[in-house]
Image (cartoon, helix red, strand yellow):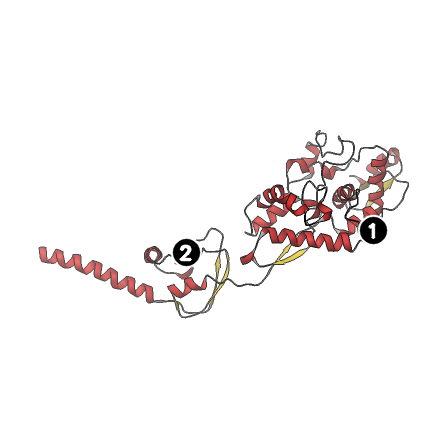
């Protein structure tokens, strides 16, 4: 009986050892394949992706820990590879540039959310960088001299980035350089202009208030005229900003519920401009502010088709509401 027991004790480890060695050398990819690694995946996730024994995989990883961290992306894996070569393949992701589009009329919370959803940063990394690096960037970019935040100047555009070599500081510099090129240089704006901050502030509101390039210069005139004559701007687009909401979170219902809030941004209760701009305006919108079109109007509203209707007096504006707001 003891002999049988001893034999079993010897057979089981031997069987396990042979099986494990076979597992290590076995071909695990019979065809060329693309393996998608997601943010929450680990090397142990390869068990399901390659349809291999998860227990043997754990042992393999314990004795052969990979030297590189696993990054979320797509990896090309050749056919006829064993596990060791598959893991080596995961060092070199497919390096097609990722096209990141930063839309106009978005704020820093939108941009942070966009980058974190693409797994490029952790949530609030951009917002924290904005607080900590602004003074250093002011030394490089003259137009940041009076800036209280970077977001006015994070120029809306499409940027090609390598997700495997992404650095937030480099991306920010690309956006600031784009602003310098498309706004400061192409629009021939003096970066020392003391009115630059106020004009960007107006443009950030205009970007949200009017979509049509054709109408922007006229709406810009109305906003500037209200300011110059000590009127409240009455731009509902400013209501959401102090609550650190993204574009999608700033719903008409939220605006309606907070329309009378008193803070540094609500232009229905604050005379003059918001404390800071509320979005990242495009060059077209900034140009419309600098070249606003004179008109006799003080009021405007949009109908359900986003057609704009102007009025000279409050009575005309009320009449437009009755005609066009259903």
What is the number of the mark on residue 43?
2
Please state the horizontal and vertical placement of residue 219, each as a whole percent of the image. 83, 44
User: Could you say whether the residue bearing mark 1 is in a helix, strand or loop?
Assistant: helix
Which residue matches tag 1? 214
Q: CA distance from mark 1 to mark 2?
A: 54 Å
Question: Is 174 in front, or is 76?
Answer: 174
Please state the horizontal and vertical placement of residue 117, each as a whole percent of the image. 57, 49
Residue occupying image coordinates x 43% and y 70%: 79
**Is disc 1 in contact with disc 2, using a CB cutoff of under 8 Å?**
no
**Above or below, 38 relative to 224:** below
Question: Is 228 in front, or is 315?
Answer: 228
Residue occupying image coordinates x 54% and y 47%: 122
**Above or below, 279 relative to 165:** above
User: Could you say whether the residue bearing mark 2 is in a helix, strand or loop?
Assistant: helix
User: In this rendering, would 1 be left or right of 169?
Assistant: left
Please state the horizontal and vertical placement of residue 230, each as a whole percent of the image. 84, 32
Graded by Cα atoms within 10 Å as few (under 14), some (14 to 19) or many (20 or more), the crowding at tag 1 reads few
């Amino acid at each position: 009986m003891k002999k049988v027991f001893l034999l079993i004790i010897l057979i089981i480890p031997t069987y396990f050892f042979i099986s494990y060695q076979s597992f290590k050398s076995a071909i695990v990819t019979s065809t060329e394949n693309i393996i998608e690694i997601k943010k929450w995946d680990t090397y142990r996730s390869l068990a399901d992706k390659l349809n291999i024994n998860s227990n043997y995989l754990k042992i393999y990883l314990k004795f052969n820990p990979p030297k590189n961290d696993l990054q979320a992306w797509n990896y090309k894996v050749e056919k006829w590879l064993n596990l060791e070569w598959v893991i080596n393949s995961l060092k070199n992701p497919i390096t097609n540039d990722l096209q990141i589009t930063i839309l106009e009329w978005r704020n820093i919370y939108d941009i942070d959310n966009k980058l974190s959803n693409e797994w490029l940063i952790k949530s609030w990394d951009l917002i924290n960088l904005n607080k900590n690096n602004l003074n250093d960037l002011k030394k490089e970019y003259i137009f940041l001299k009076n800036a209280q935040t970077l977001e006015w100047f994070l120029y809306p555009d499409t940027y090609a980035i390598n997700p495997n070599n992404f650095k937030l500081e480099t991306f920010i510099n690309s956006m600031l350089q784009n602003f310098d090129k498309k706004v400061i240089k192409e629009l021939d704006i003096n970066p020392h202009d003391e009115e630059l901050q106020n004009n960007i502030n107006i443009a950030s509101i205009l970007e949200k208030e009017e979509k049509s390039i054709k109408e922007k210069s006229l709406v810009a005139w109305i906003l500037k005229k209200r300011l110059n004559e000590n009127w409240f701007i009455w731009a509902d687009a400013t209501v959401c900003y102090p609550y650190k909401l993204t574009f999608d979170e700033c719903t008409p219902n939220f605006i309606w519920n907070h329309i009378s809030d008193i803070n540094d941004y609500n232009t229905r209760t604050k005379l003059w401009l918001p404390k800071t701009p509320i979005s990242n305006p495009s060059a077209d919108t900034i140009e419309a502010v600098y070249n606003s079109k004179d008109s006799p109007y003080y009021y405007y509203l949009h109908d359900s088709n986003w057609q704009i209707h102007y009025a000279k007096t409050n009575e005309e504006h009320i009449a437009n509401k009755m005609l066009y707001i259903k």
